[in-house]
Amino acid sequence: MHHPILIGNMSITFLKSRHETEGEADIFELTVPAHAHLNVPHLHRDYDETIIGMNGFTTWTLDGKEHQIGPGQQLHIPRGVAHTYVNTFRATARMLCILTPGKVGPEYFRELAAAIDPEGKADIPAIAAVMARYGIIPATA
C-alpha cells in the first residue's frame, strides 16, 4: 500500500507505480483542496496524462484553453502540451491520474514535497532541478 504524499495542501496517493506496472503506467489519486492551484504550468516530455474526475471540480488549462473536469469526466493531455489546473470551487476535488508510460513514480512527488518547507515556502531552484530530472518542463503561462 502506498502512503499519501503531501505537496503543500495537495495529496497524491499512488495506486500503482511504474515499478508495479513494468513501466507501463503510473496511476495515482490527486486530491486538491478548495481554492488550491498548481503553481507551475508545465509539459511532460516523455509521457501522456489522462485525468478522470472523481469528486468535486477542477479547471485545467491546456495550451491556453480551459476545461472543467467533474465526476466521471475525462481529459487527455498529450505529451508536449503545456497545462496547469486550479480548484476555484468550495469543495475538495479528487481525480484519478494515469501517466503512460510510467516514468516518474512516487519518487518525483516525494522529491517535490521535500522542496517545500512546512510553512509552504517553495525552494524554486530545487523544484526546477527535480522537474528537469523527470522530464517535466516549465511552460510560460
Image: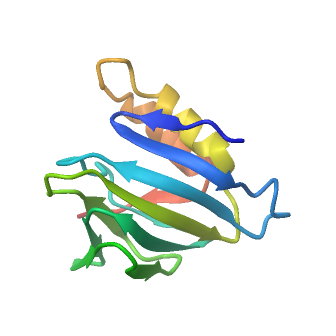
Q: Within the image, what quadrant is residue 9 found in?
A: top left
Left or right of residue 119, residue 25 in this image: right
Q: Within the image, what quadrant is residue 18 found in?
A: bottom right
Q: How many marks overall? A: 0
Of all residues shown, which one is farthest toward the top?
118
User: Which color scheme does this rendered protein use?
Assistant: rainbow
14, above or below 1, in the image = below
Image coordinates of residue 130 in percent, x first then y, are 55, 41
Image coordinates of residue 112 in percent, x first then y, are 50, 37
Q: Residue at x 70, y 64 (%)?
A: 102
Q: Quadrant of the C terminus?
A: bottom left
Q: Residue at x 65, y 54 (%)?
A: 15
Image coordinates of residue 38 in percent, x first then y, are 31, 51
Given residues 19 and 130, the one toward you in this image is 19
Q: Residue at x 58, y 68 (%)?
A: 98
Left or right of residue 138, residue 96 in this image: right
41, above or below 119, in the image = below
Of all residues shown, which one is farthest toward the right?
22
Given residues 89 and 123, the one toward you in this image is 89
Q: Quadrant of the N terminus?
A: top right
Q: Within the image, what quadrant is residue 41 found in?
A: bottom left
Given residues 25 and 33, the one toward you in this image is 33
81, above or below 93, in the image = below
Given residues 92 and 8, the one toward you in this image is 92
Q: Residue at x 35, y 33 (%)?
A: 8
Image coordinates of residue 99 in percent, x first then y, are 60, 68
19, above or below 127, in the image = below
